[in-house]
Amino acid sequence: MQKKRWIALAALRKVLTCAICSIALVALFSVHVPVFPSSKKLSAEQSWTLELAPPHLLKAPLPSRKLDGSSGTVETDKLWKPPPNRDFVPCVEPSPNYTSPTESRGYLLVHTNGGLNQMRAGICDMVAVARIINATLVIPELDKRSFWKDSSNFSDVFDEDHFINALANDVKIITKLPKELATGTRAVKHFRSWSGMDYYQEEIASLWEEYEVIRAAKSDSRLANNNLPLDIQKLRCRACYEALRFAPQIEAMGKLLVDRMRSFGSYIALHLRFEEDMLAFSGCTQDLSPAEADELRIIRENTSYWKEKEIDPIERRSKGFCPLTPKEVGIFLSALGYPSKTPIYIAAGKIYGGDSHMAALRSRYPILMSKETLAPVEKLEPFTNHASQMAALDYIVSVESDVFIPSYSGNMARAVEGHRRFLGHRKTISPDRKALVRLFDKLEHGTLKDGKNLSNRVIEMHRKRQGSPRKRKGPISGTRGSERFRSEEPFYVNPLPDCLCKKELPMQTTL
């Protein structure tokens, strides 16, 4: 009898234990915010994003409030929290003395050069140059001869009507030259790099005495970063952040991609500059096979407008001049404390080597997304084979991300960082590549382990590299000539102090 009682008691204890576990599980999963909207009827946009989600991600919970990683317990909120903006807000309105455009002395034609973001900066500078020399600006011609061979016209990438109307009080802009001047003689000039007001008002404006049309053969870095009138600096910001809007179809697709990423929660936009053109141009070979390195060397040698041919990849990497590899980015993000379920948008073109080079990053962060995985083929088709339009989509998703991290400080990285500063100093983590390389090599050689020590060192060296407000950096001490200008922080990387001002707090009255 006693034995039967013990058996019944044991059975009852098992039943109670199972019931308690079930209740705990229900309570645990009920607190997770659903990844997708729970409304009764989904919109068309929500429907296609729902269909595209890989099955294993549809039920993926958002990161928990705390995580146990290599650096111990890290508060998730801290990982996503933007730096204090110290009450800086955009201030791009012209001064009271600023006037509408005076009578035009002639027409300025502009041939832009480079990729999307190099062209963006050049276009905005040419708006300012047109103002300085009293020119009518003809809608700039985009670069069709660069590495990407993109046939896009200005109106394919940017909202042409908005650009013209938004700058109507600054510069007169037309879509094309008057017919009578289309075949006439024009002055073709390579404007001097990083030039100030005197150069344009004297040397370039003097060309109006002989010509009605001046053609700028290049547009990049033709205007000084500093020491220009405040109204000219503010005009550059109005052009860049207000007038130069992407074409409606690009804006619409960019919004859909942002919404899709938001459905996974807070996300990182990773500008992973591990593409064929970057690796060939830079000569960087880390994590590449000998055959891959040789292939890229041949591309560099056969690209005539890339002047540097003989490159020491080890020396270049040791100086921090190489982009982080996908493997290195994975180590970096883990050391910062981001959990493995962090959604990451890969803002890039085709990654060199594809899955073989992405495997190490994907093993740490499986929720890797891109425009190709987020959008149906038919929706992306109008933009495919147009590098500038595809880059514009990446730009939109990157600017709107919770955290932006570039693997290399190229033109897109600089443009996005500056735009995020302008919009309120959104969190942008700039990897210290030179310092990180030393840590990665120690990991490789076994003198440092992937864990708390590495994490503490990485976090500490990036504590002040997260996009907090500061004035634009001037030239490096001791540099001269063009190197002095080259060493300055570019205007569009940091529009403070010219275009960002302290917000005026309302005056408090005492009774």
Image (spheres, helix red, strand yellow):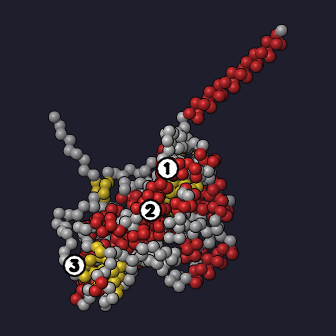
The answer to whether the residues at label 2 and label 1 have Cβ atoms under 8 Å apart is no
The CA distance from mark 3 to mark 1 is 49 Å
Decide: is 242 above or below 189. above
Judging by the rendered image, the residue that carries numbered circle 3 is: 104
Residue at the spot x=30%, y=61% of the render? 499
Amino acid residing under circle 1: Ala
Q: Is residue 206 left or right of residue 28?
A: left
Q: Nearer the viewer, mark 2 or mark 3?
A: 2
Q: Indicate the quadrant where residue 289 lies.
A: bottom right
Judging by the rendered image, the residue that carries numbered circle 2 is: 250
The CA distance from mark 2 to mark 1 is 18 Å
Could you tell which of marks 2 and 1 lies nearer the N-terminus? 1
Q: Indicate the quadrant where residue 457 lies.
A: bottom right
Residue that extends furthest to the top in the rendered view of this protein: 1
Residue at the spot x=52%, y=60% of the render? 379
Residue at the spot x=58%, y=55% of the render? 368
Decide: is 173 above or below 416. below
Q: Is residue 245 left or right of residue 463?
A: left
